[in-house]
Every structure is written in C-alpha cells, then in structure tokens.
Image (tube, rainbow, N blue to C red):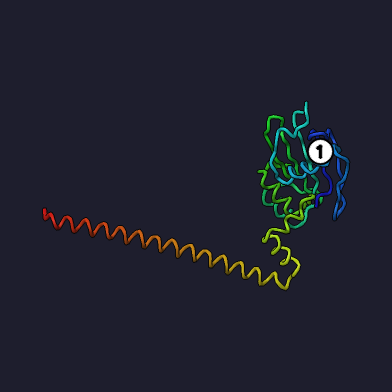
Amino acid sequence: MLAEMRIQGLGVIDDATLELDPGLTVLTGETGAGKTMVVTGLSLLGGGRAEASRVSEGARRAVVEGRFLARAQALALAEEVGADVDDGELIAVRTVSADGRSRAHLGGRSVPVGVLGRLAEASLAVHGQNDQLRLLRPADQRALLDRYAGDAVAAPLQAYRAVRAEWQKVCAELVERRDGARRLAQEADLLRHGLAEIEAVAP
C-alpha cells in the first residue's frame, strides 16, 4: 500500500506531499489544480513512461517519491533486487531530468524502471473516469467473474491454465515437427532428382 507520496518539480506542482489512508482515496479539484500531475506522479512511481515535457519550467528535474507499506509481494521483490526495507516500509523514487533521462530507485538501490512497475502491481491501483470502458473487454470480464467466484474457481482455473499451457506447448511442437518433416521431404525429393540426373548422364 502507498502511504505517502511527494512530488517535486512536476508540471504545476512545485513541491507537494500527499498522505494516503488505507483503502480508497478519491482525488478531486478544479481544472488546473494539478490532478493530472498527481496521476502522472503515480504513473511514474509505477514505472510509467517518463516525458521531459512534464518537468516544471525552470526545474532541472522532477522527483516523485513514494513510501510503501511493504506486504509479502513487496518484501519478496525488495529481497530479489537487494533493496532495503526500513521498519516495514519501502521507499521508491523516480527521477526525470529536464533532458528526458529517467532513473528509478527502490529501497536506496538503483533499479530498472520495470521493478517499480512490479511493485505498483502489488501495491497500487489507479482508476480514472474512463475505467468503465474496461468492462467491454472480454479478458477483463472473465477476470472479474473469476475473482467474484473466489476459491471455488481459483484452484480449477489454475489447473486448467497449467493444462492449457502444456497443450499449447505440444501444439507448437507438433507444428514445428510437421514443418520439419515437410522440409526434409522436399530436400529428399531434390536429392532424388539430382541422383536421377546424374544416373541419366552416367559420367
């Protein structure tokens, strides 16, 4: 869970700190108040694309820092990348310079941006006004139904996915072998034709 976020030099935000409570936080405000920059900050903290145009005019860089309460997945990720966890908290930092260069740090350690993305997947969910459009996608509809069904469906679903993955692997192998057999047959025909021509010339 993201407990606190600090934004510096991002768009209209010079320096602001946002403290978040557990659960749902709703962000509202007038046009130009900086809502988009807060969402942009969350996106950067979650490994999103960095754009130099988002850095405040006159600033050398934009910095977004997040203090996460480390749960099991976050702790496992921190251990994997060698990040320091301080009293159950994990600090993530994303820096974007005015020339477009971006850096990511987790627990005081420089990490690839994708690591922040993995942390955000486990700790953060951002919803916008067009989220309802996701309900039109079949994959999201299935995911919602599976989640609603709970444990009664989770185990069979996992078993099904394992069997399906194995089936897809075997199908791909079968296609590869058929293609290989076809190539070998063509090569054999070519060699037979060559031998026939040699025998006809009888050198």
Which residue carries the number 1 mark?
7
Residue 163: percent from left, percent from top:
58, 69
Question: Residue placed farthest to the top in the image?
Answer: 58
Residue 95: percent from left, percent from top:
73, 37
Q: Which of the pair 38/32 is nearer the observer?
A: 32
Residue 124 appears anywhere in the view: no
Q: Is residue 85 above or below residue 177?
A: above
Graded by Cα atoms within 10 Å as few (under 14), some (14 to 19) or many (20 or more), the crowding at tag 1 reads many
Q: How many marks?
A: 1
Residue 65: percent from left, percent from top:
79, 41
Label 1 sits on what residue type?
Ile
Residue at figure coordinates x 16%, y 55% from the top left: 198
Question: Residue placed farthest to the left in the image?
Answer: 203
Residue 139 appears anywhere in the view: yes
Residue at figure coordinates x 18%, y 59% from the top left: 196
Q: In this view, does 143 lie above or below 85?
A: below
Relative side of 170 to 92, left or right: left
Relative side of 58 to 142, left or right: right
Q: In this view, does 58 lie above or below 195?
A: above
Q: Which of the pair 65/126 is nearer the observer?
A: 126
Classify mark 1: helix, strand or loop: strand
Residue at figure coordinates x 74%, y 54% from the top left: 133
Residue 24: percent from left, percent from top:
85, 54
Res. 186 image quadrant? bottom left
Residue at figure coordinates x 70%, y 60% from the top left: 140
